[in-house]
Image: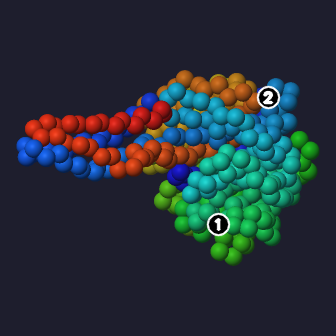
Amino acid sequence: MTMLRATTSGPKRAALLASGVVAAGVLLAACGGGTGTSATTATTSTLPPLPPDVLAYVALAGSGSSVGDGSTLVQVTVSPPPSSVGTPIKVGTYPDAVAVTPNGELALVANYSSDTVTPISLPSGTALPAIEAGSGPAGIAVAPDGKTAYVTDANANTVTPIDLTAMKPETPIAVGGGPQGIAITPDGSKAFVADAGAIIAGQAGGIGHQVTPIDLSTGRALSPITVGNAPIGVAITPDGSTAFVTNLNSESVTPINTASDTAAAPIAMAGGPVAVVVAGNDAWVVNAPATGYPGNNVEPISLATDKVGHGIGLPKGAQNIAVTPDGKTAWVVCLNTNSLVPINLVTKRAGTPIVVPGGPFAIAIANQAKVQPTTGSPTTSVVKPKTTTTKAKTTTTKG
């Protein structure tokens, strides 16, 4: 499996808003001569690689009056069609964020109410022993080298590094109040943490308005950057130059220069922006409802001009977004309607939702390579005089 170089964080908006690919391998026998003697030849084949499946890993937080009680993750095959929803995998309570390692071997689920991270072996589809994090894990990102995951602890005001070789937590890093989303630069040098403050019921303190950069080479938090109120989601451009931060209570998105750690002018959004991902020439922002605005849409921000494009309507409860590795489709989880909605990033239109029961809340997407079936032992063909015999063997893999 190969993974898209972007991670997604799962802010607890529910509590706030109450709301057949066929590959054929053909073996051909050689043509015999007219010598009157049978000839025996052995031929083996090398089948071409099959296109990968595209899989969404969706955390289920519970639905209706049970939001926050969920404790499973499901694998959803989103491409090629037909789509399918796999068997739920048990994780911790209130799975709030999902990330996949660059090698595609592990999914990591941050469990808000359990104060743990659940690693899941993707080849086997089984949960491994939970790893302790700080209080209220809310977001998670994996370093580009795949060695360390970084978890935001919303109730502890820290970021916990997790050694993915030893599967153990390391010394927490102090950041601002109520950290939620986190993203890492493509070179692995810095992480940017959205310090949302007390946006969750039961949290102490006020609403936050800063982003904390972390120097990952030293594990040291740098000077905070002032942004809008209740910053939630973070995404970084593929060239690493800009981080986009969604400010839920300011109805805006703030671009940050990652080299100088300075914020540019905020970009106004029509709604409560909760999540963001960068793909192609745009940053794609998921908007929840806000005062005077219906929300439940996705709006693109041009990377070239910082201008906001036309919104794409979504079902109720839009929470989070991830993009397929080919950069052509975004998938949005919609909590209230138990749906996973595709957005064609070329035509900028929404497609037919996939029903995912259980309160889809956070999402990560990765490719899963298909294993090409072998053709078995070398095939032997017997060629008789003045006769050409052709044997064909076709292997079909259901997509």
Question: Circle 2 sits on which residue?
Answer: 63
Task: Name the spot of residue 12 as percent of width and height, x first.
Answer: 78, 41
Judge by depth and name the residue closer to the eye, 396 or 335: 396
Label 2 crowding class (10 Å Cα cut-off): few <14, some 14-19, many 20+? many
User: Marks 1 and 2, how far apart in space?
Assistant: 34 Å
Label 1 sits on a secondary structure element that is: loop
Judge by depth and name the residue closer to the eye, 304 or 42: 42
Question: Circle 1 sits on which residue?
Answer: 147
Under mark 1, the amino acid is Lys
Q: How many marks?
A: 2
Q: Quadrant of residue 314?
A: top right
Residue at (83% x, 59% y) in the render: 132
Q: Quadrant of residue 176?
A: bottom right
Task: Name the spot of residue 51 as percent of width and height, x first.
Answer: 43, 42
Could you tell whether 94 is left or right of 371 in the image? right
User: Up-down: is 309 above or below 4?
Assistant: above
Judge by depth and name the residue closer to the eye, 213 or 57: 57
Label 2 sits on a secondary structure element that is: loop
Residue at (57% x, 40% y) in the render: 55
Residue at (85% x, 36% y) in the render: 69
Residue at (78% x, 36% y) in the render: 61
Specify the label residue 275 is tagged with: none
The reply to whether residue 225 is visible in this rendering is no
Frontmost of labels 1 and 2 is: 1
Under mark 2, the amino acid is Ser
Could you tell whether 369 is left or right of 117 in the image? left
Task: Name the spot of residue 379 as percent of width and height, x first.
Answer: 33, 46
Task: Name the spot of residue 70 as percent of width and height, x first.
Answer: 81, 36
User: Up-down: is 256 above or below 163?
Assistant: above
Q: Earlier in the sequence, mark 1 or mark 2?
A: 2
